[in-house]
Amino acid sequence: MDDSLYRKLGDEIAGHRRQAEMTQEELGERVRLSRTSIVNIEKGRQRVALHHLYAIADALQVDLRKILPPSDDPALQASADREEWVAEIESYLEEESV
């Protein structure tokens, strides 16, 4: 399976975390994950559950759309989880716009 989606996602999370001047440990505490899990998520080695992804965006005070690759990104197109991701994200964004 192509894990480029998770590497891109991890890069985005790490970038926003650094911009927020937050350590991996601080982010982990805020979203109830260990520092090791945050490290692995940022490296693309650990798949992040959608509820944790929402919590991460909240903790970083960033819109979820800023973290996720766009739907036409080749990394998302190549992911076997694409349909699940797109459905969950669209549902979340619809709720946010109400």
Image (cartoon, grey):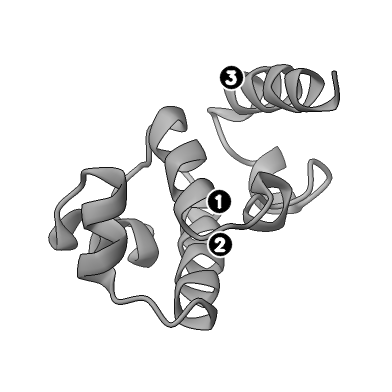
Nearest to N terminus: mark 1 or mark 3: 1
Mark number, residue 91: none
Kind of residue at disc 3: Glu
Q: Is residue 52 left or right of residue 82?
A: left
Kind of residue at disc 1: Leu
Looking at the image, residue 1 lies above or below residue 83: below
Residue at the spot 62% in from the left edge and 55% down from the top edge: 67
Q: Position of residue 79 (x, y in %)?
A: 58, 37
Residue on which disc 2 sits: 8
Residue on which disc 3 sits: 84
Mark number, residue 5: 1
Q: Position of residue 72 (x, y in %)?
A: 84, 45
Question: In the image shown, does 96 or 47 lie closer to the viewer?
Answer: 96
- Per the image, label 2 sits on a secondary structure element best described as helix
Do the numbered discs 2 and 1 sit on residues whose CB atoms are within 8 Å? yes
Q: Is residue 26 left or right of residue 61?
A: left
Q: Position of residue 33 (x, y in %)?
A: 20, 47
